[in-house]
Image: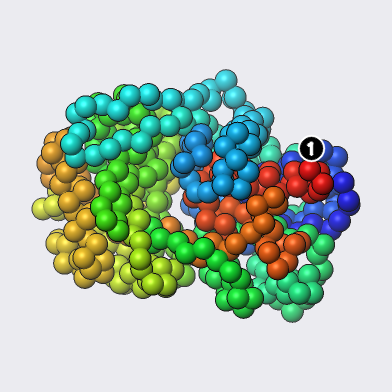
Amino acid sequence: MKKQKIVVIGAGVAGINFATKLVDNGYPGELITIIDKGNDPFNRQPEEVMTGMLGSGGWSDGKLTYHTAIGGVLSKYCGEEKAMELMDQVISNFRRFHPKPEEIFCSDPQEEPEFIKPYFGLRLFPVWHIGSNYLHEIAKAWYQYLVDKGVRFWWNTEVTKINFNRSEFVIGHDYFKYDELIFAVGKSGIDFAQQLSNKYVLPTEPKSVQIGVRFEAPQKYFQKLIDVSYDFKLYQKFDNVSLRSFCTNNNAAYVAVEETYGDISYNGHAKKGKEFENGITNFGILMEIKGIENPFEWSRNVVSKCQINNKGLYYSPNNTRKPGLTSEGTTVTSVQISNLNSFKESMGEYADYVINFIDDMNKVFNFGDDWGMYIPEVKYLSPEPLVNYDDLSLSQFSNVHFVGDALSARGITVSGAHGIYVAESLINPNK
């Protein structure tokens, strides 16, 4: 294993799993530097969702999807068997730093229930439940392990430029060199990824738009389905549009506000513990829209239209429900609208797909007017750069590796697996 100066941009699950795999195999931690715009886990606040140790998912979502068909591409790079083995390693790392690993469990639903037909399909797959309320303690223990191994962290630090040709990056007015670069930015760094793609004219694979809303209603309406699949994923498919429920949170479910490019969008997470129970279920209703020219720019334009006074929107029929509380006890930042005109104006023809999805859910779950939705929820997926399949490096720059969100991953397990996969390629370069 050649000893080189390694720089990781982004302390999310991809970058952290990458560094852990290296030091576990004897790589000198002093040669690894991890740079992040956010705070370390001892100073990161609960509401700081977008930046910091373990990224967004590892800080606020304790569910690890255990299937290669969910969360982005993995098996195409390394094959199905290897992909599952990489996921096992990610789950083992979360277990390893968990204060109560005996509380981790896996749900594995097997049979699609008849009562959701003919309106929906239901994707069934295993999910490891880590427990959202343990994530902050996991992050602290994991961070301390890497620091003890000599890994250097630069917190509250933003990389503003990267020169792939000269193997250097810029922070402020200072230039720094690297031997290997792991580009592991999360959603807050996707705009940076787009800039690099444009600058170096990186060959890419076209991506679909991923946009929709965050839906919420009392859990009692969905309990029959939750008993079958705790993290259920309903879906519908049309010619160029497919819809799915995404990232389901139950019982102690809260909506999280995300600010990207100055615009507000929404996500969700669940807390564990009696003191957090609110009897609510929330999940995203995401559309995957194919055939949109410049999907990244299109998504940003739609999100900007879903803003009033620099806030996102909240709708409930007949104003039956009001915006809920965040897990910190403050009202979710939003503007309540009395009709769906602004939603339809921002989404155009695609708004009807979301509305019809909710109407069909009402036929199955009978929640009437007792629901609300936060507008919008969006997954900013920049064009996926073409990479070498054996180490996820750029075809023109063999010492630059894209992982996680930067390589269109959409989940904790897949992102972490990306990082471990690249680390293994450096440990065994001739394998």
- Toward the top, the furthest residue is 102
Examine the rendering and report whether any part of residue 264 can be seen: yes
Q: Quadrant of residue 91?
A: top right
Q: Give the image location of residue 335, x and y in percent.
A: 26, 63
119 vs 225, left or right, is: left
Taking 294 as reference, is 315 above or below it? above
**55, 121: nearer the viewer:** 121
Give the residue displayed 13% in from the left and 52% down from the top: 317
User: Image height check: is 116 above or below 380?
Assistant: above
Q: Position of residue 32 (x, y in %)?
A: 80, 53
Label 1 sits on a secondary structure element that is helix
Scheme of colours in the image: rainbow
Residue type, mark 1 in image: Asp
What residue does disc 1 label?
Answer: 24
In depth, the one of 267 and 71 nearer the eye is 71
Q: Residue at x 89, y 52 (%)?
A: 3
Residue 363, percent from left and from top: 13, 39
